Amino acid sequence: MTSAEKQLPPIFPHRHLLGIEGLSAADITALLDLADTYVEQNRQVDKKGSVLRGRTQINLFFEASTRTQSSFELAGKRLGADVMNMSVSSSSVKKGETLIDTAVTLNAMHPDLIIIRHASSGAVELLSQKVSCSVVNAGDGAHEHPTQAFLDALTIRRRKGRIEGLTVAICGDILHSRVARSNILLLGAMGARVRVIAPPTLLPKGIDRFGVEVFHDMRKGLEGCDIVMMLRLQLERMSGSYVPSQREYFHYFGLDYEKLGHAKPDALIMHPGPMNRGVEIDSAVADDINRSVIREQVEMGVAVRMAVLDALARNLPNELRI
Amino acid sequence: MSRTAFINARLVDPASGLDVKGNLLVADGKIADLGPNLFSDGIPDDAAIVDCRGHILSPGLIDCRVFTGEPGAEHRETLRTASLAAAAGGVTTLIVMPNTHPVIDDVALVDFIERRARDTGIVHIHPMAALTKGLAGAEMTEIGLLKEAGAVAFTDGDRAVANAQVMRRAMSYAGHFGALIVQHAEVPELSTGVMNDSELASRLGLSGIPAIAETIMIERDLRLLETTGGRYHVAQISCAASVEIIRRARGNGLKVTCGVSAAHLALNENDIRGYRTFFKVSPPLRSEEDRKALVAGLADGTIDIIVSGHNPQDADAKRHPFAEAAFGAIGLETLLPASLALVHNGDVPLTRLLGALTFAPADLLGLQTGRLAAGLPADLVLIDMGMPWVVESAKLRSTSKNTPFEDRRVQGRALRTMVGGRTVHVHGDGGH
């Protein structure tokens, strides 16, 4: 058997998932609906499905990642795919093999799905042009991280029953964050009101034209919010280059109960992980089972990635390609 | 004594404003005579006749900013292949940058370029020498000796001379020799990005190079120039604010000139969408408002010259994610049509445009060419202004194919290029 047993109806009119940009609200809703079914499947004793049976999935990670890579690996395996993990360190780049060489080499092995993470914006799109299978962007530079936005949206929708009309604050290093960009696009497309809260040095140029409200004061920005989404701030950016110190950053932009008090009483706390406890988020807030949905995000991550793999595989040819 | 008679030409001499129907006679590599009434007594029997059929006969183009790979990276471009591309593009003189391996910072290397140009090139080639040794930005080169050897100006090419003290002394010293300093105006610390700093950069997740990287450097250099005197030229400006700065400085009587690349006159940052690395150039392509300001600056004379900024990069240097790809685009063969688009659009008058490609660069560098005048070398280009064509990189003469104009429909082509009386390029029947 070289292909899935039966062809399921297509629900997602794209060959790749390179970003949220270009997706319609209907595309997004279809994936979230499918993901909902996988949440249930993943909570069963028998979690194994077969829609990807016979399919080969390669996880090609040029940037180290524990949670995203394992989430994609589990998602593929639960759908019955053969999953291969490739962590390409910078050493092979030093050997002279270019990114495109790597892609062409892998493509010759007839994968059906390639999941790619790369430190450069646009790298995944570049690779998608060189392969004949479907490509999922697992994060490219400061550009996009679409499955993170989907899992955040699924978490929000399951908790709040909707996305439209909610006020979502995204706080922290917006400048370097692909998570922020994908979330701004997805939440905006689904009708949420999105705010970004950061010091001016961590906001990208022209952010005010992304359809978001911009705040530099955390308390004002959190006023009336339904969702508080914290971003990771890399430690090397906190020693004077973008902000003066960890201490000052936490004082003004770290999420603690006092600042959280300005959001709605039932506001949810989210974080894409891995967290810098005590830097961008107070440990107690992060672990607050009544407010924090950070662990739930991880669970939704697997379901969302199963939905993405399933949806893309439905568009793959079911006959042998020569 | 070989003679060529160009008949039925539209003689355009931007320097004098001449634009008339007429004829031109080339003898012994020089322009012998020209005018509407030339040959009224008949064409000399021994002259080869080129019927221009009403097309423009202009001084050959002079391109003041060409990077090649010779010496050191001949797989990207040699002086010969650059000259072939130049001839095909109507360029009769090209000025090569010192950014080679080794760097052109020594008299022997200027001699090398001149000898290789003479032995292998089919157009005039002159080098700019490095302003600082090894392009390191620290110690000035032997400006006097290099100038005597034939260096037409001094520049660190695509590197800025960032140290204000170095630039101050170089300006002061070079001024004594009447040597021209050409600056790549960019503050290095502000230029660590890969494209224009803009909303689009933010959306693409690419780091930006703000316009102030350029304007701060120009403003600094102009302050230095006020105190040192000398001649200072900004190699390529890219933004509206720079046009304004130059305009104001000229108004204050400073001896400052500047250039712009044809790519910056024709393209803007939106062309980068989809992470197209062939549009990654330095300085970066900026907004449409900036492009329009550059066109206006060219039209009103604030911008003196148009350059190609020809910078050949092989496929391996460009087939990378945008941030990792090399800067640079070729441009010798598209210089003319990309520039002529401004005439077709009605943005810049023809003589003004051709002036920025002929006598203006000649005057800037002190070259005895760039005009239709008796006694000057017969460096000529016959231009079909309206000829439409599609740029196909495979057909371009450059060894490297990194053109940002790939698959573009353009208008205007060099039908025939003559360098020192020798025909070096004919397109189609090239007039006949």
Image (tube, coloured by chain):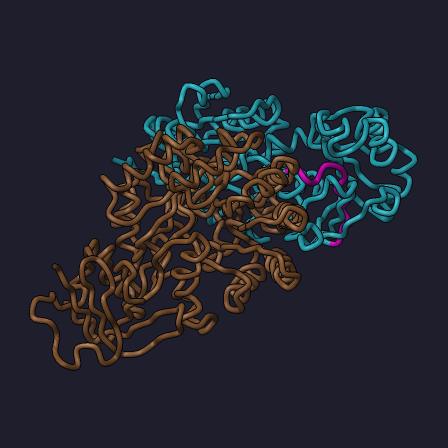
Chain colours: A cyan, B brown
Q: Is residue B353 above or below residue A109?
A: below
Residue B191 spot, x, y in % from top left: 60, 40
Q: Nearer the viewer, residue A118 or B413?
A: B413
**Residues shaded magenta:** A165-177
**Which residue appears farthest toward the front when viewing the image?**
B176
Left or right relative to A88: residue A160: right
Q: Is residue A103 above or below residue B385?
A: above
Q: Image quadrant for the N terminus of chain B?
A: bottom left
Q: Is residue A239 above or below residue B273?
A: above
Residue A289: tell me if it is visible.
yes
Left or right relative to B344: residue B260: right
Residue drawn at 50 percent across, 50 percent down: B273
Left or right relative to B52: residue A168: right
Q: Nearer the viewer, residue B227 or A151?
A: B227
Residue A308: tell me if it is visible.
no
Q: Characterize the magenta stretch by its predominant secondary structure.
A: loop
Residue B179 spot, x, y in % from top left: 50, 46
Residue A294 spot, x, y in % from top left: 74, 30
Quarter assignment of residue B250: bottom right
Q: Nearer the viewer, residue B35 or B272?
A: B35
- The total number of labels drawn is 0
Residue drawn at 28 percent across, 35 percent down: A320
Residue B226 spot, x, y in % from top left: 66, 51
Q: Nearer the viewer, residue B71 or B398?
A: B71
Residue drawn at 79 percent across, 30 percent down: A280
Residue A175 in the magenta stretch? The answer is: yes
Q: Image quadrant for the C terminus of chain B?
A: bottom left
Residue B193 in the magenta stretch? The answer is: no
Residue drawn at 88 percent across, 43 percent down: A219
